[in-house]
Image: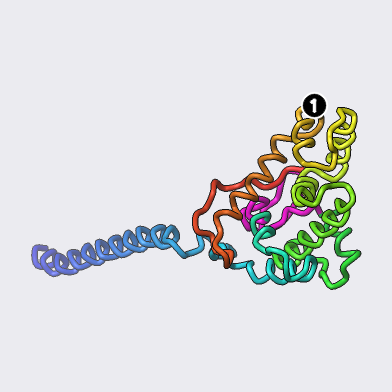
Amino acid sequence: MTAVLRRRDPRRRGDLRGLVRCVLLWSTIFAVVPARAAAPGLPRRPGVTVTPGEERFDAAFRKYSKRYFGPAQDWREFKAQGLTESNLDTTARSYVGARGVMQLMPTTFREVTSRNPEIQRLIDDPEWNIAAGISYDRQLWLQWEQDSVSDHRREFMFASYNAGRGTLLMAQRMARAESLDHRAWPSIEQVAPQMRRWRYRETLEYLRRIDRHLESMDGQGRVRSQPATAAPRRP
């Protein structure tokens, strides 16, 4: 009996050592996997891509600014608008359904693409979303040509992108009723608090955010200092 036990002891100890090595190996694996998943530059789960830098859509902003506004237009204004709308998040969606970098409503996107057949009907594609957003800016720019003074046309364009042209037209009627110059943006700011259904603070802050983002860029559109992250537009 003793001889048999002595023959079994080395094997038993070997089994225990093997079990310990197995436990240690699996412990190491499970300790490393979460660390890799949380490491910078690695996706947390399949299908999630790493977010590039702020310059990733500059080519699209340059291209469509030139196409719809001409070479003299400062394309960085539309990049500043994209930063304000979504922080350049291609997956951003507002609670009312505005989508993409430029936070376009699907109905607005369809309207824009119906007039611009070169824009493919893919609202979630960042290039076409940017193209449609700038094209919509151009539409608003032309609409305000007669209804605003040249120095304030930019404010009317961006404000109506955020709040809707109809809202701004109602504000103009109120400004005229108070004997103000309805074509000047300061007049709109003055009467804005009297408009019940217009979240005017949001629109005024929207314009300020665009300016802050623009001021944060150098001449090449590179962001020198990032302002506070802007929330997506809520029409």
Is residue 42 visible in the rendered image? The answer is: yes
Q: x, y percentage for residue 228?
A: 54, 46
Q: Residue at x 47, y 64 (%)?
A: 42
Q: Which residue is rendered at x = 73% and y = 71% of the image?
A: 71
- Quadrant the C terminus occupies: top right
SS for dot 1: helix
Helix, strand or loop: magenta stretch? loop
Please state if 107 lies on the left or on the right of 204 as rendered: right
Residue in view at x 53 percent, y 60 percent? 223
In-image side of 134 versus 53 (left or right): right
Task: List x then y, in percent, for residue 6.
Answer: 10, 66
Residue sitting nearer the eye, 228 or 111: 228
Magenta-colored stretch includes residue 96: yes
Q: Is residue 158 among what the camera can see? A: no
228 or 219, which is in the foreground? 219
Residue 206 location, quadrant? top right
Name above or below for residue 41 compared with residue 208: below
Q: Is residue 23 left or right of residue 97?
A: left
Where is mark 1, residue-wise?
A: 194
Magenta-tinted stretch: 82-105
Q: Quadrant of the N terminus?
A: bottom left
Residue 72 picture quarter: bottom right
Q: Furthest-left residue in view?
A: 2
Q: How is the image coloured?
A: rainbow
- Disc 1 residue type (three-letter): Gln
Residue 172, position as x, y percentages in the image? 86, 37
Q: Nearer the viewer, residue 75 or 98?
A: 75
